[in-house]
Amino acid sequence: MSRSSSPVSAPASGAYPGRVPDMLGWLRRHPWQADGLLALLLVALSSGQWQGDYPAAVAAVSVLLAATVVPRRRYPVAMFAVAAVIGAAQIAFSLQPAAASRQSAVGLQLGPAIQPTVADAAILILLYTLAAHRSRRVSITGLVICLLGAVVAVVRWAPAHTAHSGGAVFAAAVGLGGATLTAWVLGDSVAYRYRRAYYASLEERNVPANWRSGVPAWSTSRPRGCAGSSVTCTTAPRSGSPPSP
């Protein structure tokens, strides 16, 4: 009985390992399309929360928040400002049902329309973008705004005089504050790598090639008057010692 000698065909090289790098490369080459997909993901995740008396208004606010993600790379400060204003309005006018008796007339009208949804995660994405694409002074300002908003949101939505356990309030504060700090740290680390690569490229352009190779410039230069001469110049400096002034 003869055994077949034909080798088993191996999978094509790069069939699977290359897909993830190709996808990441496509995302880097098409930032607008990538951010558009991210905005669509936020809208899809928040669609299950479009409920209440004004579901269309909740949907409109969610879509507006998600839309700020699309031009975030070109206009990070402006998009962060728009999202921060929407978040501030949500904190000011949107309360839990147990606290509805203390709402103002404006809050009773706007509250059901601007309920927080998953689309509010756009604020964290914009904070990350602010830290990655703007100076640290600007990004720290955005970080302070987000941290203050998180504190006010916890106090506003979970007041101490209602039936809320202290552990739940503490967990909410740690969750919001931790997510905010994480977004800023990730963006700031990206900015640090960009700055480091930029300064390295400047040094690479400014340092002569022979210094980059470890050979001093004066060790390979010929003294004046020896250029083009076939005679060995006795005045040439020795390799390893600098020329005399």
Image: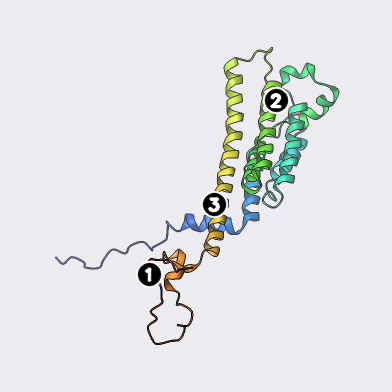
Q: Could you tell which of marks 1 and 3 lies nearer the N-terminus? A: 3
Ranked by sequence position, the earlier of labels 3 and 2 is 2
According to the picture, the residue beneath numbered tag 3 turns out to be 196
Q: Amino acid at mark 1?
A: Ser
Residue at the disc numbered 2: 152
Q: Nearer the viewer, residue 47 or 144?
A: 144
Element marked by disc 3:
helix
Residue at screen point 70% across, 52% down? 74
Return the x and y of residue 44 as percentages of the image width and height: 64, 42
Residue type marked 2: Val
Which residue is drawn at the image coordinates 69% and 21% (left, top)? 155
Q: CA distance from mark 3 to mark 2?
A: 37 Å
Percent position of residue 111, x then y = 78, 28
Colour scheme shown: rainbow
Counting other residues with Cα less than 10 Å from the Cα at mark 2, is it few (<14), some (14-19), or many (20 or more)? some
Task: Please tell me how crowded label 3 is: few (under 14), some (14-19), or many (20+) other residues with Cα within 10 Å.
Answer: few
Nearest to the observer: residue 136 or residue 111: 136
Q: Residues within 10 Å of mark 1 (few under 14, many from 20)?
A: few
